[in-house]
Amino acid sequence: MQSPLAQDRPRTREPGSDEIDLLVLFRLVVRNFKFLALVSLAFAVTGALWSMFVMQPIFESKAMITNRTSDSRAGQLGSTVSPLIQLLSMSGGNQQVAQFQKILESRALTEAVIDEGGLLKKLNLAEDQQHGLAGTKARLAKSLEKGVFIELEGDFLTISYRHTDPQFAYEIITLYLDQLTKRIQGTMQTSAKATEIFIEKRLQEAEVSLAEVEKKYVNFQKSEGLVALPSQLGITLSAASSLRNRLIEKEMEIALYRDIIKDSSEIQRLESERLQIKTQLDKLIEGQNRTSARGSGTTGSQSNRNIEIYTPLKQTGTLSVEFANMERLYLSQIKLVELLKNQLEVARIDSKRQESGFLTIDPPTIPIYQVAPNKTIITILSGMLGILIASLIVLMMNSIRTLPRFMYRIVKTNRPKPEAV
């Protein structure tokens, strides 16, 4: 018969006896099921209470945007273009949205959000003792950059921010979108917008030129006594022709009287009338009064008083050319201004249609439901952690050869109880 010491000696293990016996482990778990369940339940209840009363609720506000230009182009093209062109337009949209992402991730935009929203005063942040207000602002900007999540998926860009205050989270996303709009308008410029700016500048130049040409045109009319040159020339030719006929009639009457009576008062009267007619005809042809007025250096107001409806025939060629040039230049400037105005309207429509910007698909809202902590997940993970810890306790106790007597009442092991000596 073997002694008790011989019985306590460890038995020699057979080869492969160090492998885990799943059946033995399963029996061990079944025998300690109540212990495992109580520990898991205790951990689960603790995790649930912790998530409900200790952890602060976190709310998330987010927005989804896409490129407005690529979206409008896709709507305009529709099915009238090939899939290759549609693919190219989509790739252009991806590049544009990627630019939006870079702008949102820039430090300059984050600092603009801080300044625009007055976040330093709103959050009551203490001023940095070493770097002052600039250091506080830099620290807040770094915190915002870490807290704002920007995710790019194809043509869609999602921006989100989490905070314990739902109103503050909503304001942050709104400020980011507002600053993005300002940055896009200030930095990005489409070809249509560039064309609009060019046409607008050209229109301003054309309007200035039109005002100058119009002033010269009016001054030319006033200085030359022109109202309607073709009509005035017609009137002058008609008057000159009438005077010429009357002059011929007077000369014929004078010649007839001279043949009859050589010295008579009637001949003197006819000579006087012929001289008056010839003077008027010379005036229509030479324009002596106008020439003398120019030579005497009369002012514009005085020359305006001497304006007549009869244009001197001798100056008809020069005046016609000058008047035609001034009128052609004036009319061409008017047509140019009208053309540029029409082009400007077309460019504005095209620029608005192709305006570089983003389209808000999912606008930010004030969140109602919290996104963290997730009470269900925390409770489940706490329960699983309890099961894991309880299982480790059971396995550790099962591996210990000698246990206190009261431990066998709690944990049921697969080893035999030690016999009393």
Image (spheres, rainbow, N blue to C red):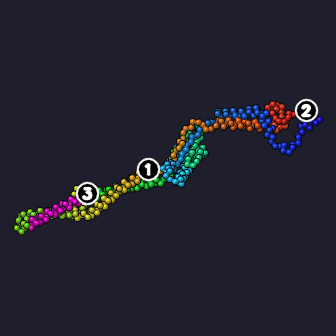
The answer to which image quadrant residue 63 occupies is: top right
Q: Earlier in the sequence, mark 3 or mark 1?
A: 3
Q: Quadrant of residue 171?
A: top right
- The quadrant in which the N terminus is found is top right
Q: Main secondary structure of the magenta part?
A: helix
Q: Nearer the viewer, mark 1 or mark 2?
A: 1
Task: State the quadrant of the C terminus.
Answer: top right
Identify the amino acid type marked 2: Val
- Vertical arrangement, residue 207 with respect to residue 13, above or below: below
For disc 2, the marked residue is 421
**Left-right relation of 10 to 123:** right
Q: Which residues are magenta?
A: 226-255
Kindly identify the residue that appears in the image at 30 percent across and 59 percent down: 327
Q: Which residue is mark 3?
A: 228
Q: Tell me where residue 36 appears, x and y as whole percent.
A: 75, 34
In the image, residue 348 lies at what x, y percent?
Answer: 43, 50
Task: Tell me which amino acid carries mark 3.
Answer: Ala
Q: Earlier in the sequence, mark 2 or mark 3?
A: 3
Count neighbours of disc 2 (C-alpha within 10 A) and say few if under 14, some if 14 to 19, many if 20 or more: few
Q: Earlier in the sequence, mark 1 or mark 2?
A: 1
In this figure, which residue is indicated by the disc labeled 1?
A: 349
Side of 211 where 161 appears, left or right: right
